[in-house]
Image: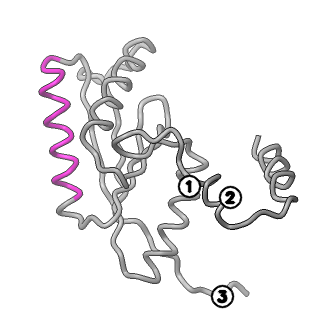
Amino acid sequence: MTALYRELSKAIQSQEQDLQSVREDLQETDFQRGPYFCGYATFKEVYHLSARSAARSGEVVQLAMLTVQSLSGAPLPKPQVHAAMSRLRDTLSSTLRLGDVITQFSPTQYLIMLPSASYENAKKAISRLMSKFQQAHPRPSFGVQYSLLPLLPVMNTVIP
């Protein structure tokens, strides 16, 4: 898929255009309020860009992982996993900021990039998210666990 995308991109880029046309093409057409949801490959590219930017500017970006688990510790059935992840996505959509980036990493996990957030502010944002989720779903048959780490900025190292 990635190779096909690159080939299609080359075909589009083979024609010379003016900057205004390019900017219009880049403009987000199906804008949705809330955080930016994307596939893992795109999330990884945004992560790399954020790491480069953080190395240059000193900006702090936090990376969070939310994991849906059964309360008993037993694996959740697929329909229950799907329902839980859908409910969690709804809460993510209504709670997080416009510049936050989210991907579904696995069947039971979301990754979230929180730009311009200190550890304390990111922890508050995730706590607020968890509270809203619990308010919307007071008696779930599953729990949501989270972890939080800072993004690692790109290091200027020379590889021999």
The disc placed on residue 158 is 3
Name the residue: 50% across, 38% down. 30
Q: State left or right for residue 31 relative to residue 137.
A: right
Amino acid beneath label 3: Val
Q: Nearer the viewer, mark 3 or mark 2?
A: 2
What range is drawn magenta here?
Answer: 122-139
Task: Name the image quarter holding residue 40.
Answer: top right
Name the residue: 20% across, 31% down. 133
**Residue 81 pos. (x, y %):** 40, 20
Name the residue: 45% across, 15% down. 78
Which element type, helix, strand or loop, lies under badge 2?
helix
Q: Taken as a whole, is the magenta stretch helix, strand or loop?
A: helix
Disc 3, disc 1: CB below 8 Å?
no
Front one among 88 and 14: 14
Name the N-terminal-most of marks 3 and 1: 1
Which residue in the structure is indicated by mark 1?
Answer: 44
Q: How many marks?
A: 3
**How many neighbours does mark 2 have within 10 angstroms: few (below 14), some (14-19), or many (20 or more)?**
few
Which residue in the structure is indicated by mark 2?
Answer: 21
Disc 3, disc 2: CB below 8 Å?
no
Q: Nearer the viewer, mark 3 or mark 1?
A: 1
Task: Name the image quarter holding residue 18.
Answer: bottom right
Quarter in which the N terminus is drawn: top right
Q: CA distance from mark 2 to mark 1?
A: 27 Å
Name the N-terminal-most of marks 2 and 1: 2
Amino acid beneath label 2: Ser
Which element type, helix, strand or loop, lies under badge 3?
loop
Amino acid beneath label 1: Lys
Task: Name the image quarter holding residue 156.
Answer: bottom right
Disc 2, disc 1: CB below 8 Å?
no
